[in-house]
Amino acid sequence: MNKANNCSVLIPSITVLAFLLMIYPELAVSQPATLGCCYNRDANECVGCVGNCSLSQELCGSNSWYVNGDEGYKCVLVPPDQDQSCEPASGPGCCEYNERNCVDDVDFSACNGVGVAWFEQESCSNVPQCLQAVQAPIPTLTNWGFIALGGILVAAGLYAIRRRMANT
């Protein structure tokens, strides 16, 4: 019986601690990822970038190298021979906070650590990950639909009242 009491206190305590660590990530072991550049050493090219951008480490492929730093890095095309390299990132751009949740004119330092990707001097309307999916229209009732629904509800109510009066 004593073991059951101990478990009934231990399990809720662990659950509360887990929720606190989710609410306050600075208390947890993991910290928000610094945005950087996914660089494939074998091919000497950046991976997963569209234009000049910076990605979260989770978006890097398995054969990529994540360049980490305090200020973060971005993938850049070098014009003469179109090579790709990693350079420190700064300035305004489009910050992708999560799928289809993007904000324009966000400074890199404001996006770093909270966003999953940052696109230098790009409008979010030009970033494929930020484009809103076309949603099907939500079906609604017209005025005549509301009138018909009201009539059905009145008829059902009258039927229920008549039935109750017949039973008494």
Image (cartoon, rainbow, N blue to C red):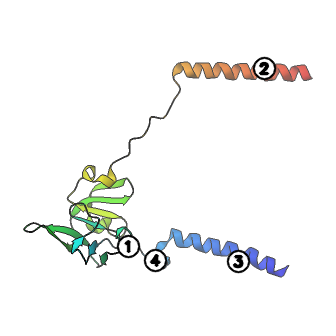
Tell me the CA gap for discs 4 and 1.
Answer: 9 Å
Residue 23 placed where, x, y %? 52, 68
> For this rendering, which residue is in front, 153 or 131?
131
State the residue position of label 4.
30
Q: Is residue 110 above or below residue 126?
A: below
Callout 1, which amino acid?
Answer: Ala
Callout 3, which amino acid?
Answer: Leu
Identify the mark nearer the N-term, 1 or 2: 1
Where, quadrant-wise, is the C terminus in this rendering?
A: top right
Q: Is residue 94 above or below residue 22?
A: above
Q: Secondary structure at mark 4?
A: loop
Tell me the CA gap for discs 2 and 3.
Answer: 55 Å
Residue 139 placed where, x, y %? 50, 31
Q: Residues within 10 Å of mark 4 (few under 14, many from 20)?
A: few
Count all numbered tags in the image, as a single digit: 4
Q: Secondary structure at mark 2?
A: helix
The residue shown at (38%, 41%) is: 134
Where, quadrant-wise, is the N terminus in this rendering?
A: bottom right
State the residue position of label 3.
10
User: Residue 20 lies in what quarter of the image?
Assistant: bottom right
State the residue position of label 2.
159
Q: Residues within 10 Å of mark 3 (few under 14, many from 20)?
A: few
Q: Is residue 75 left or right of residue 64?
A: left
Tell me the CA gap for discs 4 and 2.
Answer: 62 Å
Q: Secondary structure at mark 3?
A: helix
Which numbered tag is attached to residue 33? 1
Q: Residues within 10 Å of mark 2 (few under 14, many from 20)?
A: few
